[in-house]
Amino acid sequence: MALSGLFLRRLWRGLAMSRCVLEPRSAGQRWLVAGLGNPGLPGTRHSVGMAVLGQVARRLGVAESWTRDPRCAADLALAPLGDAQLVLLRPRRLMNDNGRSVARAAELFGLTADEVYLVHDDLDKPLGKLALKLGGSARGHNGVRSCISCLNSSAMPRLRVGIGRPTHPNAVPAFVLSSFSPSEQELLPPLLDRATDLLLDHIRARSQGLSPIPS
């Protein structure tokens, strides 16, 4: 029975991804960018990091290039950024276990913790606010805590995307796992664009040996 075209395309992408991992690193810098979240729960506040990563993939023309990599239990896409290369990663593990996928991918691509960007939601910032920080504590975020534990480092740069905080502390679990309201969804397209701009500008500056402007 003939193999379907879709299967062949996925097989080819998987083989190409394997070659990219095994081949010597090119002269340009390579960065891993991980959008933290829960697989199967797109559109929720807790997975806004994955939404940002999707916008990055669209901006860089690789939105149709995602390949599932069982070695790190994640979807990967490779994207050029000037002389640099980005490894975009969407974990296929739950948020609290995202770090295992991120650490394994960093190992496969020969990257250190400070070459790994984490993009994630932030309860302490209102929706629409962004901040990019270099390293530091997890600040109560379980996905970041998992990455710190699995990478054995807190040096990863993080793009924090504000989602706001409910007034009652007991409402936090349901809040982060719920979808954005219709009025909030109207704010998302420009927010994802600004987040993408901030992230890519930061990576470009570091790739060129420049000091990024603090966000």
Image: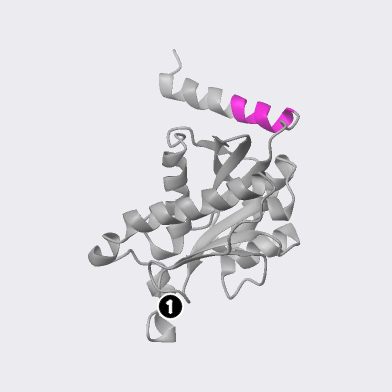
Q: Which residues are magenta?
A: 15-23
Residue at (59, 46) in percent of width and height: 204
- Image quadrant holding the N terminus, namely top left
Asked whether residue 84 is in view, the answer is yes
On screen, residue 9 above or below 211 = above
Q: Quadrant of residue 145?
A: bottom right
Q: In the rendered structure, does residue 22 fall within the stretch colored magenta?
A: yes
- Image quadrant holding the C terminus, namely bottom right
Residue type marked 1: Val
Q: Quadrant of residue 180?
A: bottom left
Q: Which residue is mark 1?
A: 172
13 or 204, which lies in front? 204
Q: Is residue 73 left or right of residue 3?
A: right
Asked whether residue 40 is in view, the answer is no
Is most of the magenta stretch helix, strand or loop? helix
Residue 132, x across and y down, in percent = 56, 63
Residue 72, x across and y down, in percent = 63, 45
On screen, residue 106 above or below 44 = above
- Other residues around mark 1 within 10 Å, as few (<14) / some (14–19) / many (≥20): some
Residue at (65, 60) in percent of width and height: 147
Q: Is residue 13 left or right of residue 145?
A: left
List the single residue furthest toward the top: 2
